């Protein structure tokens, strides 16, 4: 079988394009849906944290319910995705990674004994965004890395310069950034 | 010198093998997801997959998710090897 260099070039270009497209689909996976879900949870949770009763048990209940919704929603997204691309090894590793991160976040909050609800929120947000950066690096997705770094920076700015409105800041800019990023991914990556 | 693989060189089959080879180790893609990715019809994808399966280049795993039958696909080790040899041959031509 013989082909011209032009045909060979065209075939290699096709291979390159499909390889990149496949990796992008894999990397994005359910990222847009996770971002929309958790962005909405932050928007609602932080808005309530800013304006409702400051008693710890009230906030604990609000975030407990929202985190439960997030966990169930994430599991459902994961289940839907596994019907299109499945990898036992990857799913288990990703699940264990987030479980370990959750454990370390809880340990960090317990050990550092933060004196304000803003600091508790900042510690959890920073740990979650570390998770985004790590996942982005692992899945070779620069966008996810930049989302993680961007929200971390916004959170630190809000904590140090707008402490009184930190929860509102996190609702609009943190939750908003996650939701806008998810929406953008859905539009741009299709 | 690497040789071109006539079976893989066909445009659709080349794209199928490129997509399946890009999957990480131990990962399978469902038939409709591959169809959407490559923008093919069910019949077209099915026909080319059969040829690749007959050659031992593609592993087809039929299963049920809930009550729905699903077909998951991946490149076999022989398929990955043949695809890489074909790409190497293409590179030699343009070198």
Image: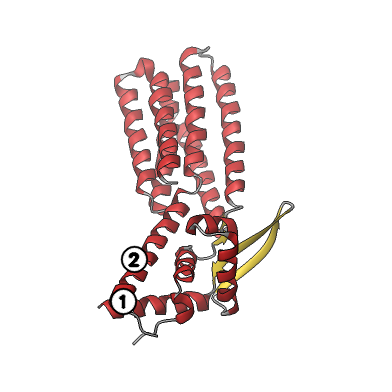
Rendered image: mark on residue A13:
2
* Viewer-side residue, A92 vs A58: A92
**In the rendered image, residues at marks 2 and 1 fall on the same chain:** no
Q: Which residue is drawn at 49% across and 70% down?
A: B13
How many other residues sit within 10 Å of disc 2, few (<14), some (14-19) or many (≥20)?
few
Residue A83 located left or right of residue A90:
right
Q: Mark 2 lies on which chain?
A: A
The image quadrant of residue A150 is top left
List x then y, in percent, for residue B59.
59, 71
Q: What element carries label 1?
A: helix
Colour scheme in the image? secondary structure
* Viewer-side residue, B66 vs A122: B66
List x then y, in percent, for residue A118.
41, 22
List x then y, in percent, for residue A158.
33, 24
Name the residue tied to disc 1. Answer: B91
Above/below status of A14 relative to B88:
above
Q: Residue furthest bottom?
A: B1
* Viewer-side residue, B77 vs A45: B77
Q: Which residue is drawn at 43% across and 40% down?
A: A187
Q: Mark 1 lies on which chain?
A: B
How many other residues sit within 10 Å of disc 1, few (<14), some (14-19) or many (≥20)?
some
- Structural distance between the alpha carbons of marks 2 and 1: 11 Å
Q: Which residue is drawn at 54% across and 62% down?
A: B27
Would you say residue A114 is visible in this rendering?
no
Q: Residue furthest right?
A: B67
Q: Is mark 2 on a helix, strand or loop?
A: helix
Residue B8 located left or right of residue A73:
left
């Amino acid at each position: 079988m013989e082909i011209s260099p032009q045909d060979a070039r065209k075939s290699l270009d096709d291979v390159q394009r499909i390889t990149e497209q496949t990796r992008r689909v894999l990397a994005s996976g359910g990222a847009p849906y996770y971002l929309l879900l958790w962005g909405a949870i932050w928007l609602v949770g932080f808005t309530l944290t800013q304006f409702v009763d400051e008693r710890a048990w009230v906030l604990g209940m609000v975030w407990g319910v929202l985190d439960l919704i997030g966990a169930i929603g994430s599991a459902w997204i994961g289940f839907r995705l596994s019907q299109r691309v499945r990898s036992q090894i990857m799913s288990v590793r990703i699940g264990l990674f987030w479980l370990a991160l959750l454990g370390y976040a809880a340990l960090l909050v317990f050990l550092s004994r933060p004196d304000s609800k803003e600091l508790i929120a900042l510690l959890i947000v920073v740990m979650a965004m570390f998770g985004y950066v790590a996942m982005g690096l692992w899945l070779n997705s620069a966008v996810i890395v930049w989302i993680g770094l961007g929200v971390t920076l916004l959170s630190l700015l809000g904590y140090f310069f707008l402490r009184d409105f930190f929860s509102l800041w996190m609702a609009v800019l943190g939750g908003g950034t996650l939701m806008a990023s998810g929406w953008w991914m859905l539009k741009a990556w299709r | 010198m690497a040789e071109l693989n006539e079976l893989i060189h066909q445009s659709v089959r080349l794209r199928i093998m490129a997509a399946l080879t890009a999957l990480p180790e131990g990962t399978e893609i469902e038939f409709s997801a591959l169809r959407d990715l490559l923008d093919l019809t069910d019949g077209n994808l099915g026909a080319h997959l059969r040829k690749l399966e007959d050659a031992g280049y593609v592993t087809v795993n039929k299963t049920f998710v809930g009550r729905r039958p699903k077909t998951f696909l991946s490149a076999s080790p022989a398929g990955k090897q043949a695809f890489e040899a074909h790409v190497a041959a293409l590179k030699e031509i343009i070198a």
